[in-house]
Image: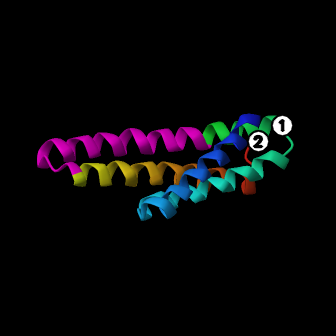
């Protein structure tokens, strides 16, 4: 759990959007939100909630990537498939963050 804060380093990839004029890299700036985990006190409930949120994100990526691969196999359109994989990547991150926030607010045990 304490290593989750290092995901904030992926936010530096957002700077590639400035140099390459590719707006797809700007989404990596969202990883800077994981720096907020550096000040959190680690306990069992926090770790359990992170595991539950990670499982939700895993399910989203499992189903989403299966659909993206099927879409790519049916259409043979590589740009469409790469867009679908990018959408799944963003969806799994949003699923983790939203699930984690819901679990933390409810205080589920």
Residue 14: x and y in percent read: 54, 57
Picture quarter with the C terminus: top right
Residue extent of the magenta highlight: 53-78
Q: Is residue 61 magenta?
A: yes
Q: What element carries label 1?
A: loop
Q: Do the residues labelled 1 and 2 touch (CB within 8 Å)?
A: yes
Residue 39: x and y in percent read: 85, 48
Is disc 2 surrounded by few (<14), some (14 to 19) or many (20+) residues within 10 Å?
A: some
Residue 60: x and y in percent read: 44, 45
The answer to whether residue 45 is above or below residue 94 is above
Q: Residue 94 carries which label?
A: none
Q: Which mark is residue 43?
A: 1
Is disc 1 surrounded by few (<14), some (14 to 19) or many (20+) residues within 10 Å?
A: few
Q: Which of 7 and 37 is in front in this view?
A: 7
The residue indicated by pointer 2 is 46
61 sits to left or right of 66: right
- Measured Cα–Cα span from mark 1 to mark 2: 5 Å
| Residue 1 seen | no
Q: Is mark 2 on a helix, strand or loop?
A: helix
Main SS type for the magenta part? helix
Residue 93: x and y in percent read: 53, 50
Q: Quadrant of residue 70?
A: top left
């Amino acid at each position: 759990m304490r290593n989750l804060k290092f995901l904030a380093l992926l936010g530096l990839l957002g700077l590639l959007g400035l140099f390459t004029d590719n707006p797809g890299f700007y989404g990596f700036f969202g990883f800077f939100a994981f720096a907020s985990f550096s000040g959190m006190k680690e306990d069992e409930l926090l770790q359990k909630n992170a595991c539950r949120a990670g499982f939700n994100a895993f399910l989203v990526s499992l189903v989403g990537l299966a659909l993206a691969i099927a879409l790519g196999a049916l259409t043979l359109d590589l740009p469409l498939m790469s867009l679908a994989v990018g959408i799944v990547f963003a969806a799994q991150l949003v699923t983790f963050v939203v699930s984690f926030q819901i679990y933390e607010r409810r205080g589920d045990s």
